[in-house]
Amino acid sequence: MSTLAKQAAVGAAGVITALGAWQYAAIGPLAGSPLPPATDAIAAAVGLLGTADLWSAVASTLAMALGGLALAAVVGIAVGIGIGTSPLALHATRVPLEFLKPIPPIVILPVVVLVLGPTASMGIFLVFFGCVFAIAMQTSAGVFDTDPVALATSRSYGMGRGEILLRVVLPSALPYVGTAMRVAAPTALIVAVVAGLLGGGPGLGQSLLLAQLSGSRTALFAYVLILGALGLVVAGVSQWAERRLLHWHPQYREGAR
């Protein structure tokens, strides 16, 4: 059996074990509690897959997550390059960025909802806020850590600053950027859901809120299962895209062996 097949088998066994524990708890020790059986939640999730409302909510959530992530990537990479190319700027902005990075978007949610309303634009801004600082910091670290020998060699060949940036600095920083984007992708999905759950924006978060308010426990857990599956898809796609786009880098060639 190949390594990939073994990993898939172990993962499947873990999922089955978790669902089995959930089922046992729901019909055994926690019988009569708000926790529905796993079989009921799975059946409800399968039923939701055939509804247009679910796919509309999924599309809204992904649009907010991807829109905010794309905007954060553009701004974060540009800011990171500007900071990373200047040691003075790097040290001057380290404390402010470290201060802003761990602040959850939910902190500014009331203000953003007040300004933008419970709209998709509100969700996009929250995703942008939740991702841009980490991307900027990773990019600046990658730019700053460019091999000084490579920089000196490129200068000795008469390359200008723009050419050095494009042909030496950016390729060196791309693994840092790839890691930042891979980590930010699930974060973007989480923030997009929170925007609907707590901010009233469109998407799966709003569907979760409505299921909770209606008292439909089975539907609530069905949406949780769907969100978990969507999170796995987003994480898998981001990892695949990172390896696909950076397959030429020695770090990824070594990891593929």
Image: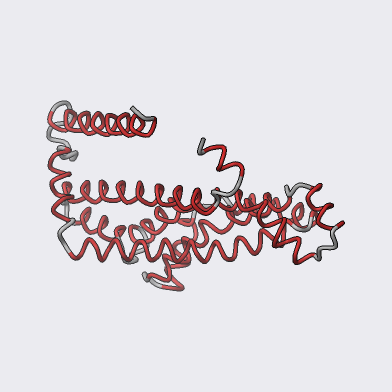
Write the residue at 40% across / 53% down: 190
Residue situated furthest bottom in the rendering? 116
Return the x and y of residue 147 as percentages of the image width and height.
76, 47
| Left or right: 83, with 187 as reference point | right
Write the residue at 64% across / 54% down: 139
| Left or right: 155, with 4 as reference point | right
Name the residue nearer the viewer: 146 or 94: 146
Q: Quadrant where the N terminus lies? A: top left
Write the residue at 38% across / 52% down: 234
| Left or right: 208, with 254 as reference point | left
Name the residue nearer the viewer: 194 or 64: 64
Return the x and y of residue 185 as percentages of the image width and height.
45, 53
Residue 197 in which image quadrant:
bottom left
| Left or right: 133, with 196 as reference point | right
Above or below 16: residue 190: below
Residue situated furthest right in the rendering? 156
